[in-house]
Amino acid sequence: MFRRQLIYKIVLFLTNRLSRRKFILVGKMISLIYYAFGIKSKSIMKENLKHNHIKFSIRLYLNFAHFLCENIYLLSNELDENIFELHNIELFNEAVKSGKGVMLLSFHYGGWDVSGQLLAKYGYLINVIYENKKEWIYEYLDKLRKKYNTILINRDSPVKIFLEILSRGEVLIVFIDQQSDNLALKTVKFLNISKAVPSGWYKLLRVSKAIPIFCYSIYKKSKYHLYFIDSSKYRFEDYYSNIDKIIRKDIYQYDFYNKIWKDISI
């Protein structure tokens, strides 16, 4: 407990004193140290990458540190809207105005976490299906995720909870590369190998008759580019083939540290 409080106070001090860029730089320097001595985390990443025949790179640590620090910086600061560029936001606005309920279908890539914060800051009623992890750091991260009133819904919640959210015309963000105990699986070709990926969300989409929007964030030229794509005509496989293509643009922006890779690999 003392160690947690000490780390929290140090981080709080740094977020108060440093600019966003300097704070991210410090995070990246720490990630290099963690890379050198984090034997366990490195082995997890290497195993996940090996499954996909992808070469390990230190860029994974640097990107992970960058995206994590963006969220942590919100401890003492407001989210800077100028670091984002929105593409086809009109599609999202029209869907929300329809009152039919919107399913934003995304995956763990680029600034996926901080992009959700942006939508909540803009005043959209955002519900996110998430994994309630037990590591102590997530106690703080989950509080940060609710900074702008985002509602976190445990991914193992009954399906009727998701249906109720959509029936009220709200926005439900679903990360479709993440498993849930109450959502079925289906095998698709994804990142070089066959994987059992979640499929229950697709049934939820059809049953709820919500408006589907495929959404993703990629970091380039010092900005987070957030894309909204009409996916009303997508088949189930189309989502994953598009994710595959997007990830390959910069494969090291994907969250290969996440344990979901152990869950869905065959």
Image: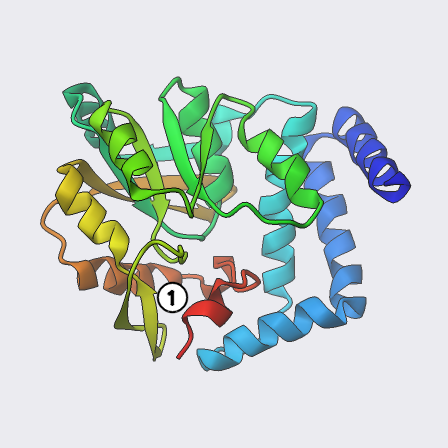
Q: Is residue 252 above or below residue 168?
A: below
Q: Is residue 189 left or right of residue 27?
A: left
Does dot 1 land on a helix, a strand or a loop? Answer: loop
- Residue 37 in sight here: yes
**Relative to 139, 218 lies left or right:** left
At 17% from the left edge and 36% from the top edge, which residue is drawn? Answer: 211
Colour theme:
rainbow
* 121 and 170: which is toward the camera: 170
Residue 250 coordinates in the image, percent (x, y): 44, 61
Seen from the viewer's position, the closer of residues 100 and 111 is 100
For badge 1, the amino acid type reads: Arg
Number of marks in the rendered image: 1
From the top left corner, tell me how far across and down residue 137 is, in percent: 70, 44
Whole-percent x, y for residue 147 in the image? 56, 24
In the rendered image, the quadrant that contains the N terminus is top right
Q: Quadrant of the C terminus?
A: bottom left
Tag 1 residue: 248
Q: Residue at x 29, y 40 (%)?
A: 104
Residue at the left extreme? 233
Residue under the image location 19 percent in, 19 percent down: 97
At x 71%, y 30%, the residue is 19
Quarter assignment of residue 115:
top left
User: Foreground: 152 or 215?
Assistant: 152
Q: Residues within 10 Å of mark 1 (few under 14, many from 20)?
A: few
Q: Residue 152: image x %, image y %?
A: 47, 34
Give the answer, above or below, for where 169 lies relative to 232: above
> In the picture provided, is 13 more to the left or to the right than 243?
right
Whether residue 88 is visible here, answered yes or no, is no
